[in-house]
Image: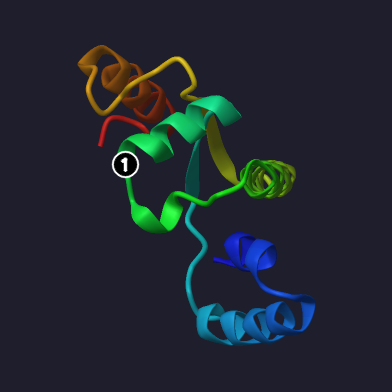
Amino acid sequence: NKIFAKNTLDSHEFNKFSRIYDILTEDLTMPNTIIFLDAELDVLKHRIAKRNRSFEHQIEDDYLLALKRDYHTFYSSLKDSNVQVLHINTSNMDFVNNNKDYQEILTQVKTMIGDK
């Protein structure tokens, strides 16, 4: 997506990517609900290390912090545009291995969108 592209491409490449992206997505409907799962930097780094994907071994803190910043900016712009958004800090959660944490997130989502 554009957030990753902004943080990995130079300005010329990003401008080209952005133009193409906009053309390819112009007819797509914007989701009416967006859920952000966020975590503190040290937690993100631990989770990345745990996945043990070779291409992720060299991810730098500055890159992760830039992504976090840009996602928060995007989240704020959506809220300001009255898009239904939910931000969940998962720093102290393990919703993959802990059913209680998973249920907590599910409850927040159901409260937001209804029990569908």
Query: Which amino acid type is marked by label 1?
Result: Arg
In the rendered image, which quarter is residue 62 located in?
A: top right
Task: Give coordinates of residue 115: x percent, y percent.
Answer: 28, 30
Q: For the point 25% across and 37% down, which residue is it?
A: 116
Q: Residue at x 36, y 24 (%)?
A: 105
**Vertical side of 59 occupied by 10: above or below:** below
The residue under the point 34% across, 28% down is 110
Q: Position of residue 37 (x, y in %)?
A: 48, 35
**Placement of 113 over or under 1, stated as above or below:** above
Question: Residue 70: horizontal and vertical position, in percent?
Answer: 70, 49
Q: Secondary structure at mark 1?
A: helix
Q: How many marks are shown on the rendered structure?
A: 1
Query: Is 63 drawn above or below residue 108 in the view shown?
Result: below
Q: Please state, as top left, top right, bottom left or bottom right, where the N terminus lies in the image.
A: bottom right
Residue topped by disc 1: 51
**Side of 87 where 76 appears, left or right:** right
**Residue 112, horizontal then vertical, whole percent:** 44, 30
